[in-house]
Image (cartoon, helix red, strand yellow):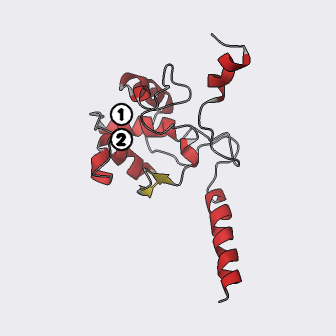
Amino acid sequence: MSAASRHAGLLVAFFAGPLMGCSEGGQPRHVVPDGDADRGKRLIGAYGCGACHVVPGVAGARGTVGPPLTDFGLRAYIAGAVANEPENLIRWIRDPRVIEPGTVMPPVGATAADARDIAAYLYTLGADRALGPPRLVPVDALDPLRGGGP
């Protein structure tokens, strides 16, 4: 196989790979069995996830310690370590150090049911987007800069 063919194959995998399995019609790419996204949204606030992360739709979730969770449902990996699949995400939420021993994300004490619901909400983030770069901050965070908002 020529170098040009290998390069072309890598480009196809890089650009087409993320598109496979993307959401359609605003539906989350992943479904969490028995997950309640509305409850998960409330739990994100209750567990204080917004102290470290930007989480769209969660009041006050504007933390900058951890990565923004904007468009989380479109991501291929969790913490750059494991595939972004419901079982892995639930494990990550419950005890992130099982997946990445050196992570600074602490275990928050989430029950299995709570982690399932939080995962269900996180998978809704980005469900309305099929293509384009991830947003680093929610669009509504820019309102004060535009002269709108509080």
Q: Nearer the viewer, residue 142 or 98?
A: 142
Residue 65 drawn above or below residue 27: above
Q: Earlier in the sequence, mark 2 or mark 1?
A: 2
In the rendered image, which quarter is residue 16 located in? bottom right
Residue 71: x and y in percent read 58, 41
For label 2, the SS is helix
Is 79 placed left or right of 16 in the picture?
A: left
Residue 146 drawn above or below residue 37: above
Number of numbered callouts drawn: 2
* Identity of the residue furthest to the top in this view: 150
Identify the residue at image location x=42%, y=50%: 79
Q: Nearer the viewer, residue 121 or 131?
A: 131
Do we see residue 122 in this rendering?
yes
Residue count near mark 1 (Cα–Cα under 10 Å), binned few <14, some 14–19, many ≥20: many
For label 1, the SS is helix
- CB contact under 8 Å: marks 2 and 1: yes
Residue 90: x and y in percent read 37, 45
Q: Quadrant of the N terminus?
A: bottom right
Residue 55 drawn above or below residue 86: above
Residue 13: x and y in percent read 63, 68
In the picture of the structure, the residue carrying the numbered disc 1 is 114
Residue 14: x and y in percent read 63, 64
Identify the residue at image location x=33%, y=40%: 105
For badge 2, the amino acid type reads: Ile
Mark pair 2, 1: CA separation:
9 Å
In the picture of the structure, the residue carrying the numbered disc 2 is 93
Residue 40 drawn above or below residue 32: above
Q: Quadrant of the C terminus?
A: top right
For badge 1, the amino acid type reads: Asp
Residue count near mark 2 (Cα–Cα under 10 Å), binned few <14, some 14–19, many ≥20: many
